[in-house]
Image (tube, rainbow, N blue to C red):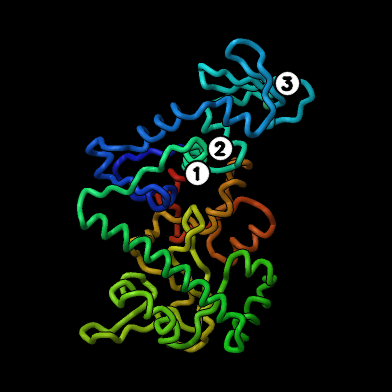
């Protein structure tokens, strides 16, 4: 299961990975303003566990403070699942599952803790924490991250679209040759970056500033010259890399060119305000539930291996770097 801590150092990591809906800055945590813990306690106090669980399963009163029902986590015909109103706690005598209101929602909905926290907050009408920034600069950074995520989503759609155009024929052939079915290509949102420096830029330039495009890692430029940015990824199969919430934050491009000038076979997005190689695991957004259930992960080297194994139905992610970094290992242990 996921436990999240907002200790300095991994605060940025959890921010990007887990709390897109609530930007709790490390500054806020340090200065003791509204922290995640305060918010969690507020929601817990407002949420009546009997009412919340009662939305999922039928509960019957069985004592002054006790309610019972059929356990939703294991099959049973006589109720061994009990909810205590004052202790705000559930326990199943059949399968042993127990915990607070967040634990129940997390297990029942098969979602992460942050997602459960948001869901319960919304159920009981506690407003989500407002973005509060300690400085203009910090607010600007958050705004920029939001725009970069938006730009990556647009770029991903663009690459997917290009794969289905006549210019993408050789890319489709390559993927078919690797045994990838259309369904898998759609699931992983695999695309094609055309062999042109300017089509993506032309697609984005009306909605995003050039400074933002430079910050995105999707473009290259020659130092000194102005307004001459061009696509970094050209004539490549594009694999989007998502954060834990499925938001696209980077790409890996596999070249389809065979000549010397084609550059590296695999090219990754550089580090950007939304992407840090050491903190992102390819396919974690899809694999996390399987990892929790199975209790293990399979780490493979390349995206194609990952897609191949994932299609076989296991909890697989791919490491963006060569070896699992410390943050990644810790993150996995938290699952
Ligand atoms: Zn049970």
Furthest toward the front, the residue is 125
Give the secondary structure at mark 1. Answer: helix
Q: Secondary structure at mark 2?
A: helix
**Crowding near the residue tagged with mark 3, few <14, some 14–19, many ≥20 C-alpha atoms within 10 Å:** some
> Toward the viewer: 224 or 175?
224
Residue 12, relative to residue 52: is it above or below?
A: below
Is residue 291 among what the camera can see?
A: yes
> Is 93 located above or below residue 51 in the figure?
above
Label whose residue precedes the other's in the sequence (1 or 3): 3
Q: Quadrant of residue 64?
A: top right
Answer above or below: position of 9 versus 165.
above
Which is nearer the N-term, disc 2 or disc 3? 3
Q: Which residue is mark 3?
A: 79
Q: Position of residue 201 (x, y in %)?
A: 40, 82
Q: Residue at x 56, y 37 (%)?
A: 106
Looking at the picture, tell me which residue is in the foreground, 283 or 25.
25
Q: Are marks 1 and 2 in contact (CB under 8 Å)?
A: yes
Q: Are marks 2 and 3 in contact (CB under 8 Å)?
A: no
Query: Is disc 2 surrounded by few (<14), some (14 to 19) or many (20+) residues within 10 Å?
Result: many
Q: Is residue 253 left or right of residue 5?
A: right
Instruction: Find ligand 1 in the image and state its quadrant.
Output: top right
* Residue identifier under label 1: 115
Tell me if 74 is positioned left or right of 133 in this view. right
How far is mark 1 from mark 2, CA to CA? 8 Å
Residue tagged 2: 106
Disc 1 to disc 3, how far (Cα)?
A: 28 Å
Q: Where's residue 284, x and y in %? A: 53, 53
Residue drawn at x 51%, y 41% is 119
Outermost residue on the top side: it is: 64
């Amino acid at each position: 299961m996921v436990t999240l801590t907002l200790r300095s150092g991994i605060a940025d990591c959890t921010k990007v990975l887990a709390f897109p809906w609530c930007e709790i800055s490390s500054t806020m945590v340090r200065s003791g303003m509204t922290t995640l813990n305060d918010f969690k306690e507020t929601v817990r106090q407002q949420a009546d566990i009997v009412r919340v669980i009662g939305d999922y399963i039928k509960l019957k009163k069985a004592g002054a403070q006790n309610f019972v029902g059929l356990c939703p986590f294991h099959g049973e015909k006589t109720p061994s699942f009990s909810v205590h109103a004052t202790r705000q706690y559930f326990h199943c005598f059949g399968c042993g599952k127990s915990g607070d209101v967040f634990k129940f929602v997390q297990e029942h909905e098969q979602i992460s803790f942050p997602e459960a926290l948001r869901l319960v907050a919304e159920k009981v009408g506690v407003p989500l924490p407002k973005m509060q920034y300690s400085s203009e600069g910090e607010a600007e950074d958050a705004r920029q991250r939001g725009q970069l995520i938006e730009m990556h989503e647009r770029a991903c759609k663009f690459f997917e679209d290009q794969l289905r155009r006549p210019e993408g024929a050789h890319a489709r052939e390559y993927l078919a040759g690797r045994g990838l079915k259309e369904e898998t290509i759609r699931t992983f949102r695999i695309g094609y970056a055309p062999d042109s420096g300017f089509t993506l830029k032309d697609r984005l330039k009306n909605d995003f500033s050039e400074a933002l495009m430079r910050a995105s890692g999707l473009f290259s430029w020659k130092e000194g010259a102005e307004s001459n940015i061009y696509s970094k990824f050209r004539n490549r199969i594009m694999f989007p890399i998502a954060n834990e919430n499925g938001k696209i934050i980077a790409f890996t491009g596999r070249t389809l060119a065979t000549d010397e000038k084609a550059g590296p076979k695999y090219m990754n997005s550089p580090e950007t305000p939304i992407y840090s190689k050491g903190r992102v695991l390819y396919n974690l957004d899809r694999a996390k539930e399987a990892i929790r259930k199975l209790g293990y992960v399979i780490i493979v080297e390349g995206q194609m291996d990952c897609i191949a194994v994932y299609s076989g139905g296991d909890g697989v992610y791919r490491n963006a770097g060569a070896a699992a970094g410390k943050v990644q290992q810790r993150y996995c242990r938290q699952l």
